[in-house]
Image (cartoon, rainbow, N blue to C red):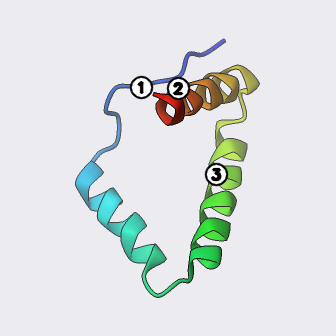
Amino acid sequence: MSDLTLTPNIDGADDFYAELLATHDGLSREESDALNARLVLVLSNHIGDRTVLAQALAAATLKISA
């Protein structure tokens, strides 16, 4: 069983963030939301570990309600 990594773990994190923002350029709010939903599903499938995914949902929920 794995645990969710919450510490910085992306090589070139700033570059990735810029790519993520650029991917949304020119999209409507609806298109941007749909892109985010597809990205979540693609990455969730890649992770594949339901325990890690449950931890990610809990961590994201904490960030929203804080």
* Residue carrying label 2: 62
User: Closer to us: mark 3 or mark 2?
Assistant: 2
Disc 1 secondary structure class: loop
Q: Residue 16, percent across and down?
A: 34, 58
Q: CA distance from mark 1 to mark 3?
A: 16 Å
Q: Residue at x 72, y 45 (%)?
A: 45
Identify the residue position indicated by label 3 in the image.
40
Q: Give the residue number, with chain letter if any, for mark 1.
A: 6
Check disc 3 and report its element: helix, strand or loop. Answer: helix
Relative to 56, 7 lies left or right: left
Q: Amino acid at mark 3?
A: Val
The residues bearing labels 3 and 2 have C-alpha atoms spaced at a distance of 17 Å
Where is residue 7, by image quadrant?
top left
User: Which mark sits nearer the N-terminus, 1 or 3?
Assistant: 1
Residue located 45% across and 24% down the image = 5
Marks 1 and 2, Cα distance to the nearest angstrom? 13 Å
| Residue at 53% in and 83% down | 27
Pick the residue in front: 30 or 20.
30
Q: What percent of the width, then of the height, locates residue 24?
A: 47, 75
Q: Look at label 2 and name its amino acid.
A: Leu
Quarter the N terminus occupies: top right
Task: Specify whether residue 12 is in view.
Answer: no
**63 versus 34 height, above or below:** above
| Quarter occupied by the C terminus | top left
Q: Amino acid at mark 1?
A: Leu
The answer to which of marks 1 and 2 sits earlier in the sequence is 1
Q: Which mark is residue 31?
A: none
Residue 65 locus on image (x, y percent)? 53, 30
Question: Which is closer to the viewer, label 1 or label 2?
Answer: 2
